[in-house]
Each structure stands twice: as C-alpha cells, then as structure tokens.
Image (cartoon, rainbow, N blue to C red):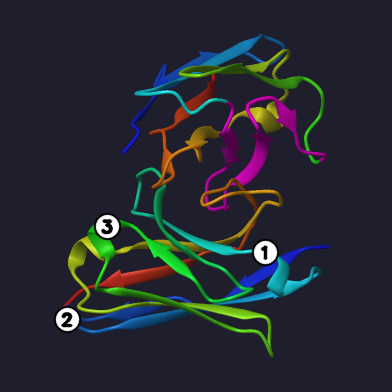
Amino acid sequence: EIVLTQSPGTLSLSPGERATLSCRASQSVTSYLAWYQQKPGQAPRLLIYGASSRTTGFPDRFSGSGSGTDFTLTISRLEPEDFAVYYCQQYGSSPPTFGQGTKVEIK
Amino acid sequence: QVQLVQSGAEVKEPGASVKVSCKASGYTFTSFGISWVRQAPGQGLEWVGWISAYNGNTNSAQKLQGRVTMTTDTSTSTAYMELTSLRSDDTAVYFCAKRGPYCGKDCYLEAWGQGTLVTVSS
C-alpha cells in the first residue's frame, strides 16, 4: 500500500503568517490526493480534492498543489479558526491511505 | 444539505461484536458509496472499507477482512458497519463518510458523520 508522509509533524505559527504543509507519497498517485481539516472532537472536513480543487466551505486562502508524489497545502494567511490538524489522503491506489497528520498550532 | 447521523457510543467486551449505523439525508443515497474510517484515541485516520449503496459491493482493509461487514438499507438510507471478535486495539471513533462523485474504486470523502466511539474493555 502507498505510504503518505506528512511534514512537519507540528507547525507553530502566528495568526497572519503563511503555513506550508507537505505530503509525500511512496509512489505516484497522479492527482488523486485530498486534504482534510480536523478540529478537536470533530469529524474531519474535506478541504481539497484532486490535489488542487478547493471545496466551497473553505476560503481562497487555502490552496493545494502538486502531482505524482509531492503535494503541498498552503494557507496564505492564518486565521484563528485555521489552527487544527490537517491530513492528506490518497485515493489513486487501493487501499486508500492517510498521512499521519500535521498539527498547525498557535505560536 | 448532506447529513450523516451515526448511532451512539458503545462499550463492548473483548470478543463481542458491534454494529454502527449511519443514516444519510440530503442526497440520493443509492448514487454514492459510503466509506468507513476509524481513529484510535489520539491517533490518525485509518480506512476501514466502503460499500456501494447502489449494488452493495464492498471492499475492506486487509487487516479487518473476515471481521468487518458493511451493509446498507436503501429503504431508510442507512449504512451499517459491523465489527466482530472485538479486541482492545479496535477502540476508536468510527466515522462514516459519503464518497465524492466521479470516483473509481477509491475516493475522497466529501461529507462525514459525527463519529461513534467504540470502546472495547473488560
């Protein structure tokens, strides 16, 4: 199965700063890569699918990029509600797998 | 709007079985598959499996094959996930999620239930 490695494990930033999260796949998943946001005690929420298509529930400060094995989630200017854990998921190869998550915390 | 409402928390002894329900609304149930994902306390997300609400075809994680059964009741737009021979490492929050459109065998998950905590303890 494809292993997704997210880095860093924790990102400590201040509101207004830029966040760059990485997700690397052990083999190509073309563009079949999604990102989810999860806050404590809540279910994950789909943020990005197809590597770069943002869902309507999220503002345009969120963007996804990449293809093949290297993907990036960028939050251009962090708002207080953006501090959460972010997971990537590949669905290009069965079984679908998740990264271990990146926690974005307030510095 | 799409809603997935799951059944309540369960406490089970090792060796027992648990069945979690997931009632869908706000879309045509048979047009999209339902996936199940679990999250152990303080840990990441683990795919359990998925079921086609159209024809009942299923696919599950290899480590759970033989212990997990996924079904649907199209008359009530409800999906079910049953896990047997429970062990302590099955303790987790179990989520159901609606698969996105235009997907092949696997998919992203565009709407999630609130989660059901299953605790396995003697």
Marks 2 and 1 sit apart, C-alpha to C-alpha, by: 32 Å
Q: Residue at x 73, y 14 (%)?
A: A77
Q: Residue at x 57, y 48 (%)?
A: B107
Q: Is B46 placed left or right of B28 in the picture?
A: left
Mark with earlier residue (2, 1): 2
Which chain does the numbered disc 2 sit on?
B
**Magenta span contains residue A36:** yes
Mark 1 residue type: Phe
* Along the line of sight, the residue nearer the viewer: A106 or A32: A32
Callouts 2 and 1 in the same chain: yes
Above or below B14: residue A57: above
Question: Where residue B113 appears, x then y in whole percent?
Answer: 60, 63
Mark 3 residue type: Gln
Question: Residue A107, can we see it?
Answer: no
* Along the line of sight, the residue nearer the viewer: A82 or A15: A82
Q: Which residue is mark 3?
A: B62
- Residue A18, by quadrant, is top right
Q: Is B81 placed left or right of A14 in the picture?
A: left
Disc number for residue B32: 1
Q: Element at badge 2?
A: loop
Mark 2 residue type: Gly
The magenta stretch spans which residues? A31-56
Disc number for residue B15: 2
Q: Nearer the viewer, mark 2 or mark 3?
A: 3
- Residue B82, by quadrant, is bottom left
Which chain does the numbered disc 1 sit on?
B
Q: Element at badge 1?
A: loop
Disc number for residue A25: none
